[in-house]
Amino acid sequence: MDSATTITTRLNDFMEQEGLTLSQFAQKIGLNIGTLSYILNGNRTLSIEQLDLITECMGLAKGYFYIQYFEEVLAESTPNWRRIKPFIYGCAEIGNWDLIHKAVQLLLDNLLYSPHLFEVAEDFYRIGKKEAAIILYENVALSERSQHSERLALCQYRLFMCKLGKDQEKNYQAAIQFELFVDRLDEYDQLEALKDLANTYRSLRRWDKVEETAEKLKNKAEILYQRTTKYNHQDYKLTTPLFTYIAYSNLLLGSVFEIKKDYERAMQYISLYANLDWVREDDKDTLIWKEKFYAWAKMNTMVTKLSAGDFSVLPEYIQYLESNKDERLLSLLNIIEAANRYHYNVDSILERFDISSIVKAEHSNDVYTKQTIEERLARFYFELADYHLSKGLYKDGFKHLMNSLNKSASINEKTCIIKCVGLFESLREKCDKALIEAYQKIITEVYNNEKKTGSTIYV
């Protein structure tokens, strides 16, 4: 398409080529003949909705004329939200992020447009168009960076959630960046934001940050719950009932102390969310959540005892594993970690389950679960490798070790990469040439990626 040719010229050419009269073309498009005449004569500005109808009638893909529309209509006139808004939606539908960015740039000099852009960004966020939402949130945040507004904090919150992905290092940087804005949010939004931050740090196994964030969540939730009556807190649109934020903070703190091997403290926190008699509400939703926390407390009690070396809980834990398919990977990981720590034989348990099927079954649309599963798989493969290699089962052991290294490299999970390298190098003399070459290829890729990003590996 010749960029010097205007849209109206293309329309006239099309009518001539197809032998269509103005009336026939208007009828074919579904426009009033007078409206079409005004558009073709340059007396009326073409709307994006009309352009889409015309484009479809001409047998062209939606968005075919969008670049020209931006140059002829939007960029050459005073910014008009009624024209720009549908243009942004149209660009989002076809995935033209560059044009969305250009359209938004037309509005940034005027802060009056920030609420409108934010509203559209929120709509994109709700319907899952994250790429488009990110562009709008970033630009609104940029325009309001000196305003210290709640809208600025909300933009940073949404950007944090949109940017979470498989790369663990990027997830950590996104969390650290957003953490600075949490206190600017509405106090009820802060609860959800702190929960999201804690979940992210938990998936990253940054237990110092999990503890810090969970304590903040607990303090804020307790204050709100104490000052709120049984009835009026229902006016706030929280994702879950208010009391669940207190209970969940105790769950998080229990997991922190289990990792620290302070099993007594871990059990104390588990008891806090196992018994929720202090909750004032008694509606159906509350009862459902109380049952969930009771079930989690029961499961985490077994995990904590297992982590402490009490293998008497294994029969009950295996029963739980068999009846909860969604928890099989995590349950087996907990068992193998304990087995490696205490040199306990779990061959009969591993033989009981189809490991490959369990690994393939791990999938979810939930953002935290996606993050957690990728990291969990890397650890699971490593623990399997460690278990088999310690018994001299080198074929299976190295297979699992390479799986762990591959998974760790793909998500930039540096701690696990280092553990894999340490275990591999300690048994290098047991490897054949092909295995060493495959290992070196992955390590070279990791090294080259580190050079590109300029980041450093930490433990």
Image (spheres, helix red, strand yellow):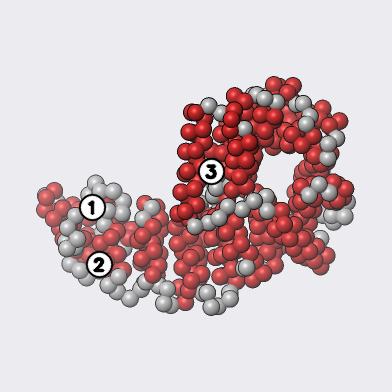
Left-right relation of 412 to 41: right
**Residue type, numbered disc 1:** Gln
Kindly report which numbered mark, 2 or 1, lies closer to the viewer in this rendering: 2
Q: Say which residue appears at 61% left-offset and 45% top-offset.
A: 418
Compared with 187, 459 (above or below) is: above
Q: Say which residue appears at 60% left-offset and 71% top-offset.
A: 150
Left-right relation of 143 to 247: left
Query: Which quadrant is home to the N terminus?
Result: bottom left
- Residue 109, label in figure: none
Q: CA distance from mark 2 to mark 3?
A: 47 Å
Element at label 2:
helix
Bin the neighbour count of mark 1 within 10 Å (Cα to Cα): few under 14, some 14-19, many 20 and up. few
Which residue, given by chain and number where applicable, does mark 1 sit on?
27
Instruction: Choose between 210 and 76: the one closer to the eye.
Output: 210
Kindly report which numbered mark, 2 or 3, lies closer to the viewer in this rendering: 3
- Expressed as whole percent of the image width and height from the top left, the position of residue 396 reads 61, 25
Compared with 107, 204 (above or below) is: above
Q: Is residue 390 visible?
A: yes
Instruction: Choose between 197 and 72: the one closer to the eye.
Output: 197
**If you read the primary sequence from the N terminus, does the residue marked by circle 1 or circle 3 appear first?**
1
Left-right relation of 121 to 205: left
- Residue 409, label in figure: 3
Q: CA distance from mark 2 to mark 1?
A: 25 Å
Instruction: Choose between 73 and 153: the one closer to the eye.
Output: 153
**If you read the primary sequence from the N terminus, does the residue marked by circle 2 or circle 1 appear first?**
1
